């Protein structure tokens, strides 16, 4: 302690250093208090409605649920691709023309029915009803064409199928 009394300049310097350190600690304390209040309000916001629940557990459950949903979506996408591939080959375009094949038979009992898929593959079935008999013809279609010549009624049925006039209007 004698060195303090022997050097009168040291006491004010040490006091000044303590003051500067105290001010610095006070500023740091104020910054930390502000940050603590912000984190505390954020925590209150996050834990609102939990009521004693474990927030970490809830977050883990949400992450697991998100992963499960992603897996479900991927499975649905795979199934949708398979269904779309099958849909291209489904015979869903239909054209039907009724007519009188012979002059002595009326009532439009004869018909030509064209059925094809998205690629134009399918068949045409024609039934010609006469007074004494009924004839049925089948012709295959590849890409909207037949390897056998088509009658006018068969061509008209094929045009209706390709034009999609027989497609149902859903939701109208």
Image: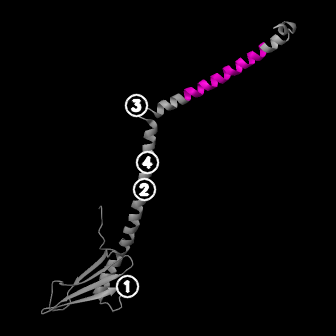
Place of residue 118 in the rendered image (x, y in percent of width and height, measured from the top left): 38, 76
User: Which of the two discs, 4 and 1, labels the residue nearer the N terminus?
Assistant: 4
The residue that label 3 is drawn on is 52
User: Which of the two discs, 2 and 4, labels the residue nearer the N terminus?
Assistant: 4
Mark 3 neighbour density, 10 Å: few (under 14) some (14–19) many (20 or more): few
Q: Which residues are magenta?
A: 15-38
**In-front residue for pair 2/171:** 2
Residue at x 29% of width, y 78% of height = 95
Q: Between tags 2 and 1, which lies in front? A: 2
The residue that label 1 is drawn on is 142
Circle 3 sits in a helix, a strand or a loop, which is it?
A: loop
Q: How is the image coloured?
A: one colour
Report whether 50 appears left or right of 15: left
The residue that label 2 is drawn on is 71
Mark 3–mark 1 Cα distance, whole angstroms, equals: 69 Å
Circle 4 sits in a helix, a strand or a loop, which is it?
A: helix
**In-front residue for pair 128/13:** 13
Mark 1 neighbour density, 10 Å: few (under 14) some (14–19) many (20 or more): some
The residue that label 4 is drawn on is 64
Quadrant of the rendered image containing residue 139: bottom left
Place of residue 6 in the rendered image (x, y in percent of width and height, measured from the top left): 87, 7
* Vertical arrangement, residue 145 with respect to residue 94, above or below: below
Q: Does the magenta run of residues contain 90?
A: no
Quadrant of the rendered image containing residue 88: bottom left
Mark 4 neighbour density, 10 Å: few (under 14) some (14–19) many (20 or more): few
Mark 2–mark 1 Cα distance, whole angstroms, equals: 39 Å
């Amino acid at each position: 302690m004698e060195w303090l009394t022997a050097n009168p300049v040291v006491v004010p310097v040490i006091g000044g250093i303590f003051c500067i350190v105290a001010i610095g600690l006070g500023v740091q304390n104020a910054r930390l208090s502000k940050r603590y209040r912000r984190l505390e309000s954020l925590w209150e916001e996050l834990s609102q409605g939990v009521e004693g629940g474990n927030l970490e557990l809830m977050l883990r459950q949400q992450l697991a649920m998100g992963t499960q949903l992603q897996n479900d979506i991927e499975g649905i996408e795979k199934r949708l691709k398979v269904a779309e591939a099958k849909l291209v080959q489904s015979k869903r375009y239909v054209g039907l023309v009724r007519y009188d094949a012979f002059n002595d038979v009326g009532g439009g009992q004869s018909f030509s029915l064209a059925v094809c898929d998205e690629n134009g593959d399918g068949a045409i079935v024609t039934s010609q009803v006469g007074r004494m008999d009924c004839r049925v013809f089948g012709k295959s279609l590849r890409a909207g064409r037949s390897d056998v010549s088509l009658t006018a009624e068969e061509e008209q049925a094929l045009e209706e199928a390709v034009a999609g006039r027989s497609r149902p209007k859903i939701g109208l």
